[in-house]
Image (cartoon, rainbow, N blue to C red):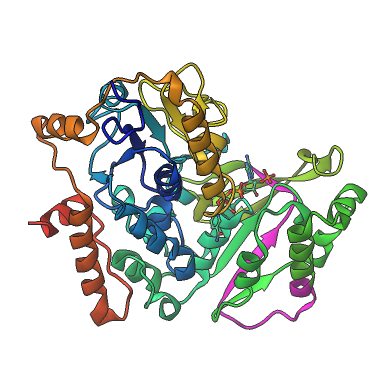
Amino acid sequence: MSALGSRSNPLRVAIVGSGPSGFYAAEALFKAEHAITVDMIERLPAPFGLVRSGVAPDHPKLKQPIQVYEKIAQTEGFNFIGNVTVGRDVSVAELRATHHVVLFTCGAETDRKLGVSGEGLPGSHTATEFVGWYNGHPDYRDRVFDLRQEAAVVIGQGNVAADVARMLGKSAAELATTDIAEHALEALAASRVREIHLIGRRGPAQAKFTNKELRELGELTNCAVIVNPAELQLNSESAAELADKNNYTAARNAEIFHGWAQSQASAKPRRIAFHFLASPVELKGEGRLQRLVLEKNRLEGPSFAQTAKGTGERFELPCGLLFRSIGYQGIPIPGVPFDARRGIFPNDKGSITDAPGLYAAGWIKRGPTGIIGTNRADAVATVATVLSDLEKFTPATKPGAAGLLPLLARRGLKVVGYSDWQQIDAQEVQRGEPKGKPREKFTRVAEMLTALQ
Ligand code: NAP
């Protein structure tokens, strides 16, 4: 029998998920000095994960990595197997039979919970739903957000919260030539939201925005930024955090907040107001969300490990629309160990605990942190682990896609290959042209499949 990783016995890798981590893992595998095939399985007919359906429509530069992924997809030995859900259409055990390695890059598909009363009231949503909706993700196509409300609240002070606030603060004219989904553009054009409250449980020194994303909130045509100077006062631990030269981003953020606090309130029709050291304790309303009860916090603990502790002092914000943007969480897949507390697949350097042959990269490996590029180094590290384990795998040949595709066909599944995706892609681009948009996305799986007929 020829050695595993030789031309006559290639290492067969199934990658589950087609976002940045999946493509960077494929790239790293193809760079190895072994014969390797990659079958990338994706539950949607469209690839690219959060780059397609997470990155905000008005951030086209952040979508440029797609050009790299398109090149990786052209590599000999790469197969895209779209419109197939692992754990439903095909089991992990079946993938283990057709492939030597199953590498999960399925991201963090759900949101963390606040765990406060009223969280489920109509009008209270997750940021994931809103982001998926304006980006045309089929799962969120039919979500309805009551944009007749004047006051909206976003809980959390990370970049997703900034995206949500910015999308609520931008005018339709600022969004019209982006790849925002048509249904979302129409709804946002009619939005009556005037006040957008961005709430952080800790202080301005701990806000997780990156500088560019924060600064951008002050550059919107129709939306002013409000920061109360009194809220920028720091305890000595926070001051020490900002003085640390490795904490440059937070120090720059603090300067941006100070600049806004000192500037005159402008007469723009919308406003984004920052609130620090406040945690939601209850969402209230008769049949729907009307008010948010918050508790003021103080910080406890040493620099860089300060946590928010409630002071008992409460206040209310009237709001009819609320978005929880407090971080994402992975979801389990049958047949794969799952750490429910962290929302990840437990692993050692990408090798999933007690599951030989199963690996993870990206958010499902380390949790929902970092920018798109962070996932490249992360995927490279997992692939290094895979390659160092090569001798542990069965040297027997495995069929890879040649075994998997007939199995999926027998189940009556309509598999979307990479050339199918290219057809969908071309049609989306064509639909966008008359509107001056880079593309008009198909927002339903059925529409994408019809486009292929
Ligand atoms: P994030 O950066 O981790 O921010 C989560 C926010 O939620 C933090 O302010 C956190 O506060 C807060 N939070 C967590 N639990 C809370 C609770 N129980 N109550 C109140 N607040 C709570 O997460 P994210 O915004 O979802 O972003 C995920 C990753 O994607 C980040 O690495 C981000 O930079 C990246 N991203 C990048 C871009 C971009 O580059 N343009 C755009 C979007 C996302 P604490 O600090 O106190 O925990």
Q: Is residue 263 left or right of residue 197?
A: right
Against 7, residue 261 (above or below) is below
Taking the spot 31% from the left edge, 23% from the top edge, the residue there is: 96
Against 292, residue 9 (above or below) is above
Q: Is residue 244 left or right of residue 280?
A: right
Against 3, residue 228 (above or below) is below
- Rendering quarter of residue 191: bottom left
Q: Quadrant of the N terminus?
A: top left
Taking the spot 85% from the left edge, 37% from the top edge, the residue there is: 301
The residue segment tinted magenta is 259-280
- Rendering quarter of residue 410: top left
Q: Which one is nearer the viewer's eye here, 142 or 334?
A: 334
Instruction: Provide residue 80's location: percent of width, then percent of height.
Output: 26, 46
- Residue 160 in magenta stretch: no
- Residue 272 in magenta stretch: yes
Q: Which one is nearer the viewer's eye here, 97 or 287?
A: 97
Taking the spot 77% from the left edge, 44% from the top edge, the residue there is: 297
Q: Quadrant of the C terminus?
A: bottom left
- Rendering quarter of residue 224: bottom right
Instruction: Provide residue 374's location: percent of width, then percent of height.
Output: 57, 50
Instruction: Provide residue 133's location: percent of width, then percent of height.
Output: 36, 56
- Badge count: 0
Taking the spot 30% from the left edge, 25% from the top edge, the residue there is: 2
Against 19, residue 272 (above or below) is below
